[in-house]
Image (spheres, coloured by chain):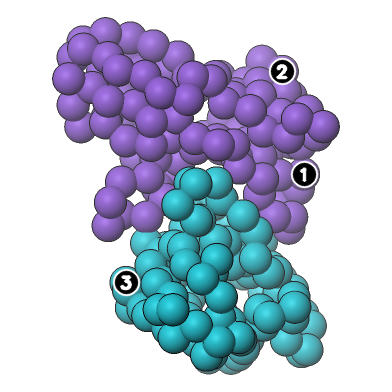
Chain colours: A purple, B cyan
């Protein structure tokens, strides 16, 4: 099992550019979620999904889109990057609502 | 809504000593699980310990144990015989139940003095 994988590990964007952060898991987990981590702010939930075809907003969804067409993949799209989106992004998955989450290694994104 | 408070953003402990990281929470769920995660400098999030709310016995994993007080909505993590490798940020996760969102607290940065 590869667990939760994220690509890329690092990315630098210019303001206004778009990109997709990839997340995949091979554990057949139903729940997947995206977080951003900023100094002093902890982990903040961006979007989450409880199964293929089902997504919902978290605490800080503005500027981000998600879709879940398969159980395995949960990409995060930045349509028009802004410097405020400079952060470390984590994807996580879990089997069911009582289970622990498994995290990917994170993506460090810098928007200039 | 489920919320969690980690009131001490930074803590320090002497190597081989014991330290307790505090966490209080609020929830409307009656059946839920609680988790502590560790994030070392490598940035990887690692599960430390898990507690089922219906269990009266506090969870223990080697040098890590919890003090779970359900009525007081308190879920503290005790690290015994602290080691240099315990230096990390620790996150208490709010109760995970059937209707709960997957939010986290702001974390506690633990440093270990040699």
The C terminus of chain B sits in image quarter: bottom left
Residue B57 spot, x, y in % from top left: 78, 89
In the foreground, B71 or A12:
A12
Cβ–Cβ under 8 Å for marks 3 and 1: no
Question: Alpha carbon of mark 1 to alpha carbon of mark 2: how far?
Answer: 15 Å
In the foreground, A57 or B13:
B13
**Residue on which the image places disc 2:** A70
Q: In percent of the image, x 44 and y 86: which residue is there? A: B14
| Left-right relation of A68 to B42 | right
Q: In percent of the image, x 72 and y 23: which residue is there? A: A72
**Residue on which the image places disc 1:** A95
Give the crowd class for mark 1: few <14, some 14-19, many >=20 residues within 10 Å. some
| Left-right relation of A15 to A57 | left
Secondary structure beneath label 2? loop
**Residue on which the image places disc 3:** B9
The image shows residue B66, relative to residue A30, as above or below, that is: below
The image shows residue B28, relative to residue B88, as above or below, that is: below
Q: In percent of the image, x 79 and y 83: which residue is there? A: B55
In the foreground, A76 or B20:
B20
Say whether disc 1 or disc 2 marks the residue closer to the N-terminus: 2
Which mark is in front, 3 or 2? 3
Q: In percent of the image, x 67 and y 33: which residue is there? A: A4
Judge whether residue A96 can be spotted in this image: yes
Residue B1 spot, x, y in % from top left: 47, 62
């Amino acid at each position: 099992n590869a667990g939760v994988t994220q690509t890329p590990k690092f990315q630098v964007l210019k303001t206004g550019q778009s990109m997709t952060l990839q997340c995949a898991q091979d554990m057949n987990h139903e729940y997947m979620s995206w977080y951003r981590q900023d100094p002093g702010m902890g982990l903040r939930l961006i979007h989450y999904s409880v199964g293929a075809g089902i997504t919902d907003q978290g605490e800080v969804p503005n500027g981000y889109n998600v879709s879940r067409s398969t159980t395995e993949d949960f990409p995060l799209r930045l349509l028009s990057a802004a410097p405020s989106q400079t952060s470390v992004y984590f994807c996580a998955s879990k089997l069911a609502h009582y289970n622990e989450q498994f995290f990917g290694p994170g993506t460090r994104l810098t928007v200039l | 809504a489920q919320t969690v408070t980690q009131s001490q953003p930074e803590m320090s402990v002497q190597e081989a000593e014991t330290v307790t990281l505090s966490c209080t929470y609020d929830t409307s769920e009656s059946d839920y699980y609680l988790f502590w995660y560790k994030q070392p400098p490598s940035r990887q999030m690692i599960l430390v310990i898990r507690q089922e709310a219906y269990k009266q016995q506090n969870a223990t994993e080697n040098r890590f144990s919890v003090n779970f007080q359900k009525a007081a909505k308190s879920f503290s993590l005790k690290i015994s015989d602290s080691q240099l490798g315990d230096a990390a940020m620790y996150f208490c996760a709010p109760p995970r139940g059937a209707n709960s969102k997957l939010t986290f607290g702001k974390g506690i940065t633990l440093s270990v003095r040699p």
